[in-house]
Image (cartoon, coloured by chain):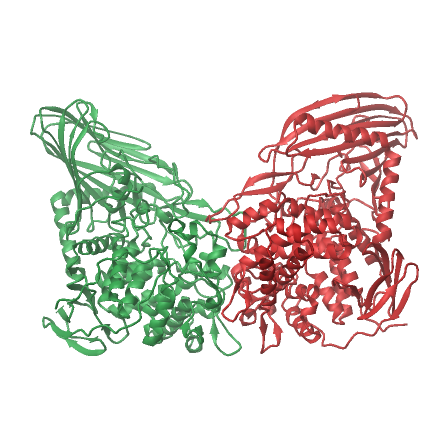
Chain colours: A red, B green
Amino acid sequence: MINHPEFTVDPWCLHAKNLDLDVLAQTESVFTLANGHVGWRGNLEEGEPHGLPGTYLNGVYELRPLPYAEAGYGYPESGQTIINVTNGKMIRLLVDDEPFDIRYGRMHSHERTLDFRDGVLHRSVEWTSPTGRTVRIKTTRLVSFTQRSIAATYYEVEPVDGPARVVVQSELVTNEQLPRPVGDPRVAVAMDNVLVAERHEALGARVDTVHRTRRSGIRVGAAMDHEVLHPPTYQLSSESTDNLGRVTLAVDLKKGQSLRFVKYVSHGWSAERSLPGVRAQVGAALTAARQTGWEDLLTDQQRYLETFWDRADVEIDGDPELQQAVRFALFHVLQAGARAEGRAIPAKGLTGTGYDGHAFWDTEMFVLPVLTYTQPDAAANALLWRYNTLTRATTRAQQLGLAGAAFPWRSINGSECSGYWPAGTAAFHVNADVADAVVRYLRNTRDVDFSQFVGLPLLVETARLWRSLGHYGPGGEFRIAGVTGPDEYSAVADDNLYTNLMAQQNLQFAAEVAGAHPDRAKQMGVSGEEMADWTAAALAMYVPFDEKLRIHLQAESFSQHQVWDFASTRPIDYPLMLHFPYFDLYRKQVIKQADLVLAMQLRGEMFTDDEKSRNFNYYERLTVRDSSLSACTQGVMAAELGHLDLAYDYLGEASLMDLKDLEHNTRDGLHIASLAGSWITLVYGFGGMREATAVQHFSPRLPSGMHRLKFHIVLRHRRMSVEVTPDSATYLVVEGEPLEITHFGTSLTLTAGQPVTRAVAPPPEREPPQQPVGREPMRRHEPRPRTS
Amino acid sequence: MINHPEFTVDPWCLHAKNLDLDVLAQTESVFTLANGHVGWRGNLEEGEPHGLPGTYLNGVYELRPLPYAEAGYGYPESGQTIINVTNGKMIRLLVDDEPFDIRYGRMHSHERTLDFRDGVLHRSVEWTSPTGRTVRIKTTRLVSFTQRSIAATYYEVEPVDGPARVVVQSELVTNEQLPRPVGDPRVAVAMDNVLVAERHEALGARVDTVHRTRRSGIRVGAAMDHEVLHPPTYQLSSESTDNLGRVTLAVDLKKGQSLRFVKYVSHGWSAERSLPGVRAQVGAALTAARQTGWEDLLTDQQRYLETFWDRADVEIDGDPELQQAVRFALFHVLQAGARAEGRAIPAKGLTGTGYDGHAFWDTEMFVLPVLTYTQPDAAANALLWRYNTLTRATTRAQQLGLAGAAFPWRSINGSECSGYWPAGTAAFHVNADVADAVVRYLRNTRDVDFSQFVGLPLLVETARLWRSLGHYGPGGEFRIAGVTGPDEYSAVADDNLYTNLMAQQNLQFAAEVAGAHPDRAKQMGVSGEEMADWTAAALAMYVPFDEKLRIHLQAESFSQHQVWDFASTRPIDYPLMLHFPYFDLYRKQVIKQADLVLAMQLRGEMFTDDEKSRNFNYYERLTVRDSSLSACTQGVMAAELGHLDLAYDYLGEASLMDLKDLEHNTRDGLHIASLAGSWITLVYGFGGMREATAVQHFSPRLPSGMHRLKFHIVLRHRRMSVEVTPDSATYLVVEGEPLEITHFGTSLTLTAGQPVTRAVAPPPEREPPQQPVGREPMRRHEPRPRTS
């Protein structure tokens, strides 16, 4: 039996009323505070018990050898794994010599609240020690959006039932012992004692430490300082050793009197800078934070989030659980990407070690659409990571005998870390996904600097890859053989439709953007001939279609394969990849996650409505959603095709992935892309938003369970909102120049401050799609007649 | 610069006139003595220098974990590696306290001769020690075909230029230190100290030892005894420790006087038997050998080989080098399989550790055709290995979700050891290959017992596999998706033609043989319905064909792929798999080894002559022969299609693979299947032999470099010969009942002792095939006009 944490439903925060140790690790993940640079899992201040202690710095990893039973040319030899750096969360408490540990004594109450508007984690506990002294503890934890190296904790302890001798040990702990990982390949390998101490110093209430990773040679610094607010007198001492920095505060408190202090922690790292350099860096950040002070850090955090929610909030009427879930999702997407600044946005953000802390294609295809319309600078910064790793990608392409750039399937530093090439190296679509994200960002921002200096190089090198990866078939069609698309239950197939259509777009845009910046393009060696060559390949791109079934094919010959025997597959056989060999999955018609359906969302103009409907129904009955990157896409297309209640079910699944721990692995970190996917289903699905170069399209429609949906986005530098009811849609540009959009294909010009309302037509009647037996999404609400 | 050993050309032996230390390991491989049960590499008696010390027992292996960078369901967790067991070859010599070591002092002569008729390895050395004493040493080494546990060495040393004090240390050495392996994945992993001592005892001139492998728990025994022939008096002592048994002989020899003795060594092993049991087993074998005595061991060996050559000899006029090569090949094929008796015949026989000592499909498809017609019992015994491992194969099939048996791609004990599934598990054709070998053996021997008790279970379980692996497509055709054929530069393709045609035959024969043994079949649960189901699937088998190119396809869509850029591929880029990623090889038209061409040899009736010719020419220009399992097949089909000189070139390549070390890895062991392939090219190629249920077909034709070819085979229990000249073929049944065969399709009845001669028609004129640039086989002889 698997427990799940219970949260109360609240529109603006996540609140856990009790502490269930069986699901401690899950709650640590959902209560993570991060800013894209530093991530603090929601571990208890006192350190123990814990599920998975975690403090992460974006870009800090250790190397490890990748072993192969049978080696092959071009296999990556070295893997990267995110590491738990120095833990600054630790605040041990002793009450009359008795350590505060919730497993002992008696706990009267334990509450945690993550506030999406304040951006802090509150905790309050009332506990009686084994020796009978009762204390109240309150903490507020913050990882700052405005000072990206800084985290801080406000700590308060008060004896309730009499005087107490209270000792607090506030620590920096390095090389914590971590729980051993289980056998699931999606879980990270363990990394013990990877940090080698370089120096440490304790001075008054301040301690700093610098370590270096054993193999990757990355220098990691951490420092802490303390501000005691009350009482005015206390005993303070500090010490430091290789793996421990400690400041000890001791006070005698009367009943009702409290000890209150703030712990400031600063993190820093560098692969290049010297020991004094890194030490200076964390020291400066710490001093700056002390200068700002706790109250102002809180205010800055609130203001930062206020600005964010103004641009990004999504309001839902009729489904409080989803209202909470979508804000939870947006908050964590922001936490993953806000201050990544040239580093990757990993699949799990900085919330856990799942997937070794690697970033995948989901950044570009699921996370960046959200950031592009809510926090465009963060989207640009994430693409900057790809740009920064372009040399590694071109080197990799050369190793593979290809031109241009081959971005890694999974990586932290930009080098390929995938140890299984059919689902790694062969998944070349990641390159077109990067290009797609570049184009989305450029369409929305028209950012000329980015276009020239980041976008163009990314588009050119990925276009070159496609040109060399594909070839012209005997009929003059441009084909891409032997690659793997998004669906991980197929691999190494010819002419994966998703890949071909995304590569086509990649080639077209490269030619277009190179044409827009002829001088920059020339510097990159792009000739008119090369541009024409890209365009020609794009025009000749082969799109596999089954004339008999009248459906597009996920890949050449796909429909020839045997259909998976769903009837004989038991619920416990899912996820299939843990119970069946790849060999069997690959050769049968069974789909892990949206592949062709995603292509229909992204390249909708390439399909007629009838084709979309037939394709959707065909692939829907093969798709088992063993990946968290599927429900949202199925939701978007279901909504487009008028299957609104089905789309609503998928929205529920995408949104509650982590809050309900649907895949039983939230303990390893959040599914950032699935969380992003809940926004995608709302905005692209029920909002019917689609991108094009000239104007943004909207074709909104609500499912029966939702009374009202209002989403805020930043579109071409205007803050705007779209409000949808069962019968109408209201578009409003809050500020900025007039903006043209379309509503169900009809052009509208929006002027700031003047809402425009248009009627929403009922959805077309179409044959309802079917899922594989037992893989239907959970019904969110029974459809009920509309009351309008 | 790579050296190659130089051998003199001699029809009946292999003679090395000198000792080149740079190629010591290669000569150790070619001078290996083995009987299919025990293998002794041609290491020098004195132990050092060595290339790779090697003593192998068929079936003795150590387990090792198979690591994966990313694990997957159904991946084998444990690998098996052949180990170097106790070395009984060691005979150290000290001349006046100076160890005999050819790296010191002065060597006047060093000769080694492997005699194919005597089955022994002679060595003679004349050497002057650093202190100036010259001795002559002669040894004769034998691994007995008639007493399969026994090896023996006759040793003679004589001072040439004055008296000498001679000490001989004859040893049993366990856990020898082995050279570290290089990076090539085809080389075995190192296994140090895998044998744990269980007991040892020295008594007089006799020592025995028993060890046990550390993880696989196999008990290995070795014992030695000594018979001193001259002089009558000598000093003898013996000793034993965990890893060393030693008998020391000391004599003072006058000039011209010699020390002569025989060392008898017995090997034994068991995974089941107790320590006393194994000890008794090697002791008994040793005593039996002493009872036989050296001279009779020699005579028995000679007689065994006389019988073999009577049935198996191949005579070639006009090409002495090939004459030697084919006998060398036959001798080593016999050594690999003669006494395997229910164990596998590994890819390298017992000549080295290459490929970890694993057996592959090459046993059934290359080695067993030779043994079936020259040593049929050995063929039956090799198939018995498959039968003995049937339970492992059915368990593996279950694990993969399949019915019947899934034989391993590579194994020693019958469990899958392949750590790369696209080239391992997916290569299901191994199962049809086993069935093919069963059918070949049954057709030749009509062995009813074998048919019922070994053949039927193998055919039934493999047919069941195919029935569950394939599926009916929408057009009613039976398809086999996502499997790998023989060509290792393609993988996981749909409807590999070779696999489909071989599976078809497998299904057909299973139904046929089950029909012939209805009671046995019933015991296996085979119903009439199941048999009909097999036949139906066989009849509906899909055979991919490209209507436009009018060629058969190696697999569905194969001709859509880009053709490999041979023009830009440099000679040093071969073998391609060491310089290009699988991903790129798989998706392009480039072929490592005969695949469809092998199907044309084995299932010739499924193709018209025109199709064969077009297919051959199409695939010939894509085939790079980076595998040693290709030249012979290309040779057979080239001969059939009339490209006789090309076939001759391929014959040269197959035959000289190891004598000329064409792939630079003979040091790791001989390419037994390629050696078998030289016979295949001669008999199936120039002899034009093809099997059918009713009669054997012959359509012989010689290349211009060959004046006469005569081969002896055992066909349906008759010893027969086929003698081919440029103009005619003469068939002779040496003894036995009359036999019907066909000569170019015309029926002939052969009566014992009455040769029948028929004319050979000139080959048809056909467009000459072309190979990829730079991958043409070496021309064996310039074509010259026939003088007839």
**Residue A702 visible in the snapshot:** no
- Is A338 left or right of B16, judged from the image as shown? right
Q: Which of B104 and B527 is in front in this view?
A: B104
- Is A101 left or right of A73, judged from the image as shown? right
- Give residue A342's position: percent from left, percent from top: 70, 43
In percent of the image, x 20 and y 56: which residue is there? Answer: B322
In the picture, residue B19 is in which quadrant?
top left
> What is the quadrant of the N terminus of chain B in the image?
top left
**Residue B225 visible in the snapshot:** yes
- Give residue A479's position: percent from left, percent from top: 54, 65
Vertical placement of residue A196 versus A725, above or below:
above
- Give residue A749's position: percent from left, percent from top: 86, 65
Vertical placement of residue B50 versus B413, above or below:
above
In the picture, residue A546 is in which quadrant?
bottom right
In percent of the image, x 65 and y 44: which residue is there? Answer: A388
Q: Which of B671 and A562 is in front in this view?
A: B671
In percent of the image, x 70 and y 65: which residue is there? Answer: A601
